[in-house]
Image (cartoon, rainbow, N blue to C red):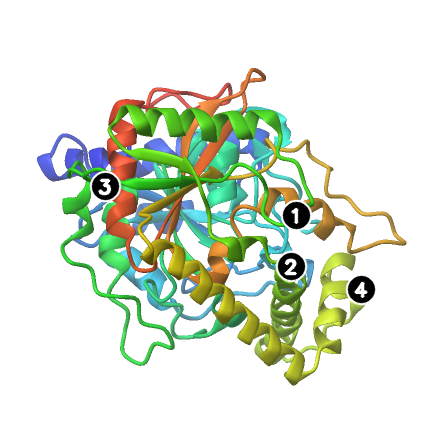
Amino acid sequence: MDATAQADLVRSGEVTPRELVEGSIERIEALNGELNAVIHPLFEKALAAEPADGPFRGVPFLVKDLMCHTAGDPMHEGMAFLRDAGWIEPEDTWLARRFREAGFVSLGKTNTPELGILPTTEPAAHGATRNPWDTTRSSGGSSGGSAAAVAAGLVPIAHANDGGGSIRMPASCCGLVGLKPSRGRVSLAPEFGDFMSGLVTELVVSRSVRDAAAVLEWVSDPPPGEPYVAPARERHYTEEVGADPGRLRIGLLTRPPGGELEAHPDCVAAAEEAGRLLESLGHSVQIAFPDALDDEKYIPNFLVRWTGGVAYNPAYWERRTGREIGPDDVEPLTWALAEQGRAHSAADYLAAMEFAQDVTRRSAEWWAGGFDLLLTPTMAVPPTVLGAYDAPPDNPVLPIVTAIPAAVFTAGFNTTGQPAISLPLQVSDEGLPIGVQLVAAYGREDVLIRIASQVEQAQPWAERRPPVFAAAA
């Protein structure tokens, strides 16, 4: 069952919150040794909790071990530095508090690559998370621990966040729904505001569109003083589920932006098949996309902002812990990217931001010119084998080059701030999930939810089960 169905069982009195929690604990204990998705079990705390009377009262949940601080719990962000320090967070973030108020019961924290940098979850600090569809494959990143746990049925839904595709890529790798909200829709308070120069947003990975819509409804009420404010919704997101999307004009892009890469045939085929499905539902689909996505200056400017954010992270943790962080305290990739970030001047950063804002305006013109959605593969490659992002000692930044095909379709919409969703519409001949991405204009999560709900009804995925899957307890 998805989270909505489990919450309905609690409301009807058919099960108690404790029964749901105990069932999830049994499933985690049975399968986590094979998957390595949950790195900080919090079972005693979960069993002792009295869940709030929110829309998801008593539903088992997991929190990604990155950014979303939960009071009294470990917080490592994939870093051996924090693991060895035994770091415990004293307070909830705004989002963690909203998850509690929704009635979710957190059973633990999920694995993530160090500081969420890579599109695979293989941190040196906690080891690799394995994909339940094929345990030799990556579950994606940086929300790979959460995605593996939901896909394997350990919990029905889990927290995730996204700075370049980190909700959508794991959703694609693990056969889930991954909705990235518009910039400013979900608050990063109180610790962060313009974190990673506005690239990052938070939500969940889920089994159903209705779960993503219901969680977004609950957390899309940011506190005052936010650096970005997304356009107000016209009605509740839960009302968009099952609503008629009308006849939409959809652009199709299967060639990776920039023209430097070729997409894997399975990924191209998944998007093309999704286009045919959308046409069968009455929508207009044509090859078209914003020219701004092809700008050759995009990746260099993105990396100025990204490496600046990587450089910020060790400095942030030095302030929090009162300890200096050196090259031996983080993975070689992290240190190399931080060094690059420190080498950029303030003028370099402002120039990169000006370029990003120009790309955002040019992209927005395409949607304003008559298109409702852009359809792409979520990733240009299927789930990679574990170890594919390993780097030789003499080239610590090689994993970032390796990561480009994974994020080439997703990262641009962290720059523009637009909402995007990955849907699990295809499975390759190898039995691997292949996601497709739909992107709407800024602030139009309502359009995404309506079309995703229509597609989910037309081509359901709820009954698909990976080889590693927990039977109901």
Cα distance, mark 1 to mark 3? 30 Å
| Residue 24 screen position, x and y as percent | 37, 34
Contact? badges 3 and 4 (CB < 8 Å)? no
Three-letter amino acid code at the position of disc 4: Asp
Disc 2 from disc 1: Cα separation: 9 Å
Instruction: Mark 3 or mark 2: name the one nearer the start of the chain.
Output: 2
Nearer the N terminus, badge 3 or badge 4? 4
Q: Position of residue 51 (x, y in %)?
A: 23, 51
Residue 300 visible in the shown view: yes
Query: Which mark sits nearer the N-terminus, 4 or 1?
Result: 4
How far is disc 2 from disc 4 in space, using C-alphas?
28 Å
> Which residue carries the number 1 mark?
404
Q: Mark 3 points at which residue?
A: 450
For the point 65% across and 63% down, which residue is it?
A: 297
Which residue is tagged 4?
328
Quadrant (top left, top right, bottom left, bottom right) of the C terminus: top left
Quarter of the image that includes the N terminus: top left
Closer-to-camera residue (327/167)? 167
Left or right of 372? Residue 52 is: left
Q: How crowded is mark 3: few (under 14 residues within 10 Å), some or many (20 or more)?
A: many
> Of marks 1 and 3, which one's residue comes earlier in the chain?
1
Of residues 456 and 312, the one nearer the viewer is: 456
Mark 2 or mark 1, whichever is nearer to me: 2
| SS at badge 4 | helix
The circle drawn on residue 299 is 2
The residue positioned 68% from the left and 51% from the top of the image is: 125
Q: How many marks?
A: 4
